[in-house]
Image (cartoon, rainbow, N blue to C red):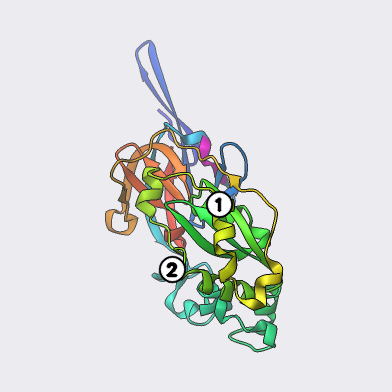
């Protein structure tokens, strides 16, 4: 009988019958899954020294166990507060400043520092896109141009379109704020995961919202483009999605039947939001 950790083989001899079981163990800190825009979307769970192509695990049983915390900034085993950071890091580092979630608060274009002006200029003073995405319903959002279509994939949008491309984050932020009075800026994660959605004509939505774009951003309106369609690797959508709290449960085993947005979908309607659990070290067994 032999047993090894990592990629290994469990062999058991019973007289003339020898049974061999193959298994794999991965361990690392969770960060949002990396993606590749293809039909369907390809998903990768990336650890420090390894990665898993999650599409290859569809219809396979996997086990996940919580090991410890690991702040994505300081690397310490401290409870995660938000966005993968411990509490002290969250209130200190520029990667977690208010303008991340509220781009209209950006000030780098004024040469005004919030937490770290060098970092803020690097992120804020680059092309940003205001877009419409249909994941649970039509919503407006903001992202760096370099994050298209990654942002749409992460939100589980099956269709999306750019409507404004501006030179900095502030202009994108005030445009989003103006349009939020006329279209949602939120995704209903349950509706998105159930795939209980309706196709929309996003070109018509773009034209409908054009009059509400602030004067400062009107010149950046995108006149002629078409929507992008996305296909997710889902074999079975959950009827009543129930979110897995791996901290509370400590471990979970289930058959993976789909991946959408940043969610893993299992055959018992359990769903696990990888991005919402950034900073947790887990062990995954196949």
Residue at mark 1 = 202
**Which quadrant would the N terminus be assigned to in this image?**
top left
Chief secondary structure of the magenta span?
A: strand
Q: In this picture, which residue range is highlighted in magenta? A: 51-55
User: Where's residue 26, x and y in %?
Assistant: 48, 46
Examine the rendered structure and indicate whether residue 121 appears above or below residue 163. Answer: below
User: Where's residue 229, x and y in %?
Assistant: 58, 43
The residue located at (59%, 85%) in the rendering is 115
The residue located at (64%, 77%) in the rendering is 215
The circle drawn on residue 77 is 2
Examine the rendered structure and indicate whether residue 222 appears above or below residue 107. Answer: above
Picture quadrant of residue 195: top left
Q: Is residue 48 visible?
A: no
In front of the other: 177 or 236: 177
- Neighbor class of circle 2 (other Cα within 10 Å; few <14, some 14-19, many 20+) is some
Residue 257 highlighted magenta (yes or no): no
User: Where's residue 105, x and y in %?
Assistant: 55, 81
Examine the rendered structure and indicate whether residue 163 appears above or below residue 9. Answer: below
In front of the other: 76 or 17: 76
- Neighbor class of circle 1 (other Cα within 10 Å; few <14, some 14-19, many 20+) is many
């Amino acid at each position: 009988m032999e047993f090894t950790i990592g990629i290994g083989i469990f062999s058991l001899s019973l007289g003339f019958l020898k049974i061999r079981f193959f298994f794999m163990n991965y361990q690392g800190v969770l960060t949002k899954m990396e993606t590749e825009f293809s039909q369907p979307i390809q998903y990768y769970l990336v650890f420090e020294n390894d990665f898993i192509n999650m599409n290859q695990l569809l219809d396979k049983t996997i086990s996940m166990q919580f090991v410890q915390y690991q702040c994505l900034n300081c690397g310490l085993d401290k409870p995660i507060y938000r966005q993968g950071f411990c509490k002290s890091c969250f209130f200190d580092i520029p990667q977690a400043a208010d303008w991340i979630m509220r781009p209209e608060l950006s000030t780098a274009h004024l040469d005004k520092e919030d937490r770290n002006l060098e970092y803020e200029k690097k992120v804020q003073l680059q092309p940003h896109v205001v877009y419409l995405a249909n994941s649970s319903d039509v919503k407006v959002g903001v992202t760096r141009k370099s994050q298209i279509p990654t942002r749409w994939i992460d939100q589980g949008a099956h269709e999306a379109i750019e409507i404004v491309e501006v030179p900095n984050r502030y202009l994108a932020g005030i445009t989003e704020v103006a349009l939020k009075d006329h279209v949602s800026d939120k995704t209903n994660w349950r509706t998105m995961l159930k795939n209980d959605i309706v196709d929309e004509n996003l070109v018509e939505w773009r034209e409908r919202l054009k009059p509400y774009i602030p004067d400062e951003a009107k010149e950046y309106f995108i006149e002629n483009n078409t929507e992008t369609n996305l296909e997710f690797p889902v074999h079975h959508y959950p009827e009543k999605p129930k979110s897995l709290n791996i901290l509370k449960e400590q471990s979970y085993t289930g058959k993976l039947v789909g991946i959408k947005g940043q969610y893993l979908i299992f055959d018992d309607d359990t769903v696990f939001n990888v991005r919402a659990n950034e900073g947790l070290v887990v062990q995954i067994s196949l």
